[in-house]
Image (cartoon, coloured by chain):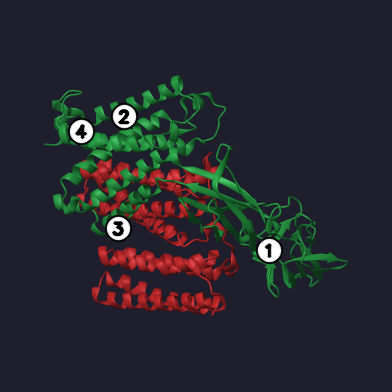
Chain colours: A red, B green
Amino acid sequence: MTWIDFPLYSSIIIILWIIGLLFLVISYKKQSVFKIATAMFAIGWIVMMLFVVKLWLELDRPPMRTLGETRLWYATFLPLIGFVTYARWKYKWFLAYSFIMASMFLIINYLNPETYSKTLMPALQSPWFIPHVLVYLFSYAVLAASSIVAIKGWYDSYKGNFNIETLKLADNLVYIGFAFLTLGLLFGALWAKEAWGHYWTWDPKEVWAFLTWMGYLIYIHYRHFHMHNSKQALTILALAFVVLLVCWFGVNYLPVANTSVHTYTQY
Amino acid sequence: MSENNIKIQRGLWENPWGYVESFFIGIGLIVTGFFLEVFVASDKAFTMSYPFNIYFLVGYILVLFVLYKWFYTTQLIRWLTKVPASISSIVLVTLLVMIMGIIPQIPSQNNIINNLGLNHITSNWAFLLIIFQFLTCLGLISIKRILQFKWSNFGFILNHTGLFLALIAGILGTGDLQRLSLSVYENKANFIAIDENRNEVELPFAIYLKDFLIDEYNPKLALVDNKNGSIAHNDGKNLYLVEKGETYYFNNFEVKIDKFFPNAIRFGSRYEVVNEIGSPPAAKISVKNIENDSIQTAWISSGSFRYPYESLKISEDYSIVMTIPEVKKFSSDIDILTKQGDRISTVLEVNKPYKYNGWKIYQLSYDDKMGKWSNLSVIELVKDPWLPLTYIGIFMMISGAIYMFWMGNKITKNKE
């Protein structure tokens, strides 16, 4: 079992997941087919695990040395977090998101066979790498969703038919996203202690990750005590997302960029 | 009654203090801090080390406790445990950190940046004062919720107390944090390390380097532009690993790797495998131009500090080159020699530090000019006696985050 079998396995997995996604969409109209969707997702995931386990046995080391291998782990764990989040919060779109993202990582690997062997520098070869990136992937997705909700809220209040339920949905998404954001930040700190000798070094990416965290902290505290000032809350939410975007894409363009250990732009 | 009504009814500094007063105090602290920076600041950062940081921590927590317990009715303490004080301090800390995120924290030519100390925010008085207010709010509300414990506050306590502990241990711990680097050569021992200010520090033990090992990936093939020497395909990313028998396509060229030797030297018209210091990897490639079916065969090599590189010019515009191999892992086989005469053997590797007697010992770097023939290993030694407290804080926050994920935003739901 090697990467040679990957096209076969990934095709099977993706086909199963696409069928699952179709049933998921139908389930918005007809709840009963949702079980079929979950079954498809689950079978696809088992095939996925089969591939990972066999690859691991074949390589005789944890498959964690190349970019392609880390993508494989994203594709393995994204559905798992998706399921846990669905089990708790029943957001179907979130389940769909996790499977679409997972499929995307499989497709990237399928389309770029040469990146299976794209090498990973020693500091990145750590068991913390995958959880660190994964929780951030989720956190950013959920927080982005909360911003979409905020835009809807803005539009609604502009039209004069703002519903407080909209803001409550945003609240809940921010709580979930913020929990993941905290985990990402702290996993990063624990990893940094193992790899670079200190848990916090005010690296530019760390600074902006901290700022993002603080931005959503402001929102949470503000919402907690001023439940009726919805306009201000929406503004804070929008600003926090701007900081998040700076952290995600913008740091490399700031004057501080060249002092960062996070500048490998190749995820 | 909504807070707007309260605002209308009361004047500035009347009970209870709101946002205006909170920001007034917070900005006041920052301005005071900047005054201190301009007029009083010394070159040395303000840090506390053992035992003063312990005294400070114990004293601080006691004072917070006393203030909460017996002075709760005073204006100041009530204000510190209320939301306006928290939000204003979060906002102001965020603003100062944002300065850090924009202005590089390195020596600067700019007078404003230098005088206000904007290039060393973490030791800036403005930052220290506002973070002190932030911590005081955090500490007081932690004490408040712990003393009035309810299970429904469990997540709140984990998050707030965790952050308080992690932050205060991080800040007070800086004074006791030691980060040293130690250079050791193969078959030699060393106990004189260098600290961050390049002072020599004598270690209570010595480190003997038995062997330094580097594992490399195979080199990669790249198509370069002859005019400017830059990589001309895949945006300079995802180059192809050189492996015997592989065939790769660059634009309209088919490149086949006939032979590959990780260590080789040129003998006349070919490369031969040798086991010699500085012998670079080499490969025999055949390049077929798909347009006119012409084939060239040649040896290419990435070169090393001892031997030149060799590339193959395949057209007017392009050449095929072999990149310097990237490091897969590097490790040091060491003995720790204690004063008692013990000898502890271990292997250091990136991401796999070794703990010894309060020190964490890391593989840091090596002589990168020599690459895999380096007989120098640079080892980092870190002693952070405050780490356990930081970790308690971090793990409380991790539990708090999981709690938060699971419980969600229940307060809003219950109240409305």
* Quadrant the N terminus of chain A occupies: bottom right
Residue that badge 3 annotates:
B402
User: Which chain does the residue under circle 2 lie in?
Assistant: B
Q: Is residue B45 above or below residue A87?
A: above
Q: Earlier in the sequence, mark 2 or mark 3?
A: 2
Q: Residue furthest top?
A: B39
Q: Earlier in the sequence, mark 4 or mark 1?
A: 4
- x and y percentages locating residue B209 in the rendered image: 63, 56
Residue that badge 4 annotates:
B67
Q: Are marks 2 and 4 on the same chain?
A: yes
- For badge 2, the amino acid type reads Gly
Q: Is residue B292 above or below residue B92?
A: below
Q: CA distance from mark 4 to mark 1?
A: 65 Å
Q: CA distance from mark 2 to mark 4?
A: 20 Å
Question: CB under 8 Å between callouts 3 and 1?
Answer: no
* Front position in the image: A222 or B348: B348
Q: Is residue A228 visible?
A: no
Badge 1 marks a residue whose secondary structure is loop
Q: Quadrant of residue B138?
A: top left
Residue that badge 2 annotates:
B26
Sort mark 1 into few (<14), some (14-19) or many (20+) by Cα contacts within 10 Å.
Answer: many
As drawn, is A6 to the left or to the right of B97?
A: right
- For badge 4, the amino acid type reads Leu
